[in-house]
């Protein structure tokens, strides 16, 4: 995450990757919760949600995360997080501000109002202590958010290309389509969408799909 370039373009909204990282973190860290998120810039209040990523146990809001891919200071704290703080203050909910960075005084202000602060560097240190399976769950959540919530094929393909540089055997690379359109920079969605047939893996209890008879 520290190396992956987060960009804003016609194919990817600014902040989409950072919000997808938050979604991946939440589904891996809180597997018992039902996690709800929407497209970046949708507006939580308009969707009758609290944060950008909310986690429920049945009807109870257990976790709410507001995502800001920027440095939070006392100068921009109210503008960027004021509504979130007001909505969550006093509730028995784990309210979290996930930010790129934050100044000490702004962090003290939030924590004094019951808001947990999680910066990019803190998340990296925390995730480094996870086992591979939990880390992988977070990556799959990230891909899910980009593919099925943001619905940015370009964003998915760009991330898969980055993953391939580090692990060219990663399972999700089966969805990679490197032949992007030169004019638009957009990679086509894989044939069959994001529901390509499951391939048989060694030791897998699932049978391989058989071809249709001619």
Image (tube, rainbow, N blue to C red):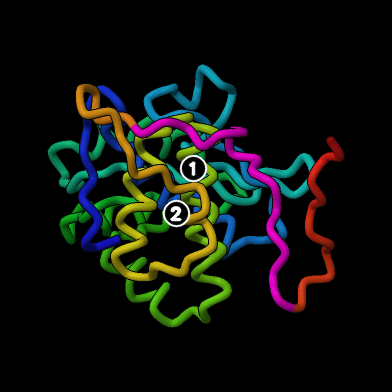
Q: Are marks 2 and 1 in contact (CB under 8 Å)?
A: yes
Q: Residue at x 51, y 37 (%)?
A: 190
Write the start and end of the magenta stretch as one range: 187-202
Quick one: SS at disc 2? loop
Q: Residue at x 46, y 29 (%)?
A: 39
**Quarter that holds the N terminus:** bottom left
Residue 113 showing in the rendered view: no
Quick one: SS at disc 1? loop
Determine the CA span between mark 2 and mark 1. Answer: 7 Å
Residue 45: % across, % down: 50, 22
Q: Residue furthest front?
A: 214
Q: Main secondary structure of the magenta part?
A: loop
**Quarter that holds the C terminus:** top right
Counting residues from the N terminus, which is met first, the one under dot 2 or under dot 1? 1
Circle 1 packing at 10 Å, graded few (<14), some (14-19), many (20+), is some
Residue of label 2: 114
Q: Residue at x 72, y 59 (%)?
A: 32
Judge whether 8 appears above or below 132 on screen.
above
- The answer to whether 98 appears left or right of 87 in the picture is left
| Residue placed most toward the observer, 127 or 83 | 127
* Residue 163 tag number: none
Residue 8: % across, % down: 22, 32
Residue 64: % across, % down: 53, 45
| Residue placed most toward the observer, 179 or 155 | 179
Residue of label 1: 89
């Amino acid at each position: 995450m520290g190396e992956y370039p987060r960009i804003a373009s016609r194919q990817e909204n600014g902040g989409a990757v950072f919000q997808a990282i938050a979604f991946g973190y939440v589904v891996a860290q809180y597997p018992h919760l039902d996690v709800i998120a929407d497209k970046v810039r949708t507006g939580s209040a308009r969707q009758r949600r609290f944060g950008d990523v909310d986690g429920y146990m049945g009807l109870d809001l257990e976790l709410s995360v507001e995502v800001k891919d920027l440095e939070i200071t006392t100068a921009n704290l109210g503008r960027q997080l004021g509504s979130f703080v007001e909505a969550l203050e006093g509730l028995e909910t784990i309210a979290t501000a996930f930010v790129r960075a934050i100044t000490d005084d702004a962090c003290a202000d939030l924590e004094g109002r019951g808001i947990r602060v999680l910066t990019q560097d803190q998340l990296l240190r925390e995730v480094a202590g996870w086992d591979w399976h939990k880390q992988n769950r977070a990556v799959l959540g990230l891909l899910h958010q980009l593919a099925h919530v943001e619905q940015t094929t370009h964003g998915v393909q760009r991330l898969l290309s980055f993953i391939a540089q580090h692990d060219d055997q990663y399972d999700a690379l089966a969805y990679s389509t490197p032949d992007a359109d030169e004019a638009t920079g957009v990679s086509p969605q894989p044939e069959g969408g994001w529901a390509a047939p499951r391939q048989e893996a060694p030791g897998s209890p699932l049978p391989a799909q058989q071809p249709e008879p001619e």
